[in-house]
Amino acid sequence: MSTKNIDWGNLGFGYIKTDYRYVSNYKDGAWDDGALITDDMVNISECACVLQYSQSCFEGLKAYRTEDGRVVTFRPDLNAERMMDSAKRLEMPQFPKERFIDAIDQVVKANIDYVPPYGSGATLYIRPFMFGSDAIIGVKPANEYQFRAFTTPVGPYFKGGAKPVVVRIPDFDRAAPHGTGNIKAGLNYAMSLHPIMEAHREGFNENMYLDPATRTKVEETGGANIIFITKDNEVVTPLSDSILPSVTRRSIMYIAEHYLGLKATQRVVRFDEVKDFAECGLCGTAAVISPVGKINDHGKEICFPSGMEKMGPVIQKLYDTLTGIQMGRIEAPEGWIHEIK
């Protein structure tokens, strides 16, 4: 069990420095061996490519203590593959999949005392990221890169349970057609900061972005994929080349079909059909599933039958099944649970 003197039950969702982080540097066409270090500071040139041209990508995953006491991560192979795709799109060297998984294993094992106890509601959040580190003044990719992975213990994303949120349809676009919406690049999140703060100032929790070409199809929010439940319990998620391939969303779709016996479909979702759905949720690593109670489209409200008090029945089953698998209460599909040994 954890030996750190932390009040796990009152932990927020924020950064707490842990003892070790993993670092590997790319220079002269190759990654070095990598190592665990204690220094949490990053020293780079004022002209580093990441500072000038935002050449960076990142991932997010968690380590858990299961009911039987193991420490595990959830599908880290998919995070590794997605980071490789992000790096390729940004003209960055790919950090190999097997090395990514090994780096996660090393940094979790080195910070094992920060993995919260089972049942606390807290987890160890893991943030792998990569950036162009050498001085670049002309518009071009960096020559040198750094891959890092740090950990921080976090509490549940929603204190006191997940209450349905209200999202709005913004006047902004999340990603351009054929742009970078399908990769986990820092630049995508930078452009979402103003719209999300504007939404908060207007009393909304998030933005639901429509496709930029026609503004008639649902895409995703600034930081989460979207799932809908039809009135006959079909699980539907939007299909678009601009949507990030969420590990959580892909897992939910599998669970819906193979664990709950529901029809699960990824397809184009027209915004004019959203009013006919029974439930809606936002899914991602941090919160797993956030239920949506209302969508505000420039003053016109779409209210889901599941209401504003609690998760709808199907989303609740999806949430309970996925978290049960992650915590070891439900048997996982082969390869989903990666034990830290």
Image: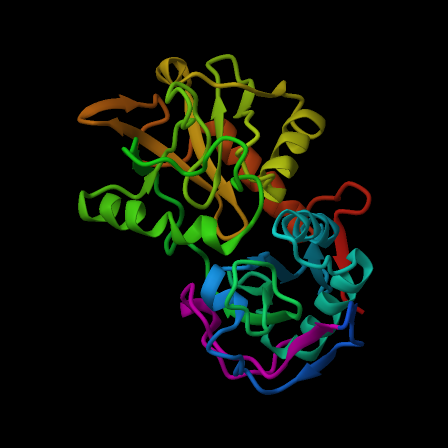
Percent position of residue 25, x then y:
70, 74
> Is 99 drawn above or below residue 175 in the view shown?
below
Percent position of residue 105, x then y:
74, 68
Percent position of residue 32, x then y:
78, 75
The stretch in magenta equals 1-27
Relative to the observer, which residue lies in front, 125 or 213?
213
The verdict on residue 112 being magenta is: no
Percent position of residue 115, x then y:
61, 71
Q: Quadrant of the C terminus?
A: bottom right
Specify the quadrant of the image occupied by residue 241.
top right
Relative to the observer, which residue lies in front, 260 or 222?
222
Report the side of 326 relative to 318 (left or right): right
Report the side of 89 relative to 292 (left or right): right
> Is 21 drawn above or below residue 181 in the view shown?
below
Q: Residue at x 31, y 36 (%)?
A: 172
Q: Residue at x 34, y 38 (%)?
A: 207
Majority secondary structure of the magenta segment?
Answer: loop
Q: Residue at x 35, y 42 (%)?
A: 163
Q: Residue at x 46, y 68 (%)?
A: 51
> Is 269 drawn above or below residue 318 in the view shown?
above
The verdict on residue 5 being magenta is: yes
Relative to the observer, which residue lies in front, 206 or 120?
206
The image's colouring method is rainbow
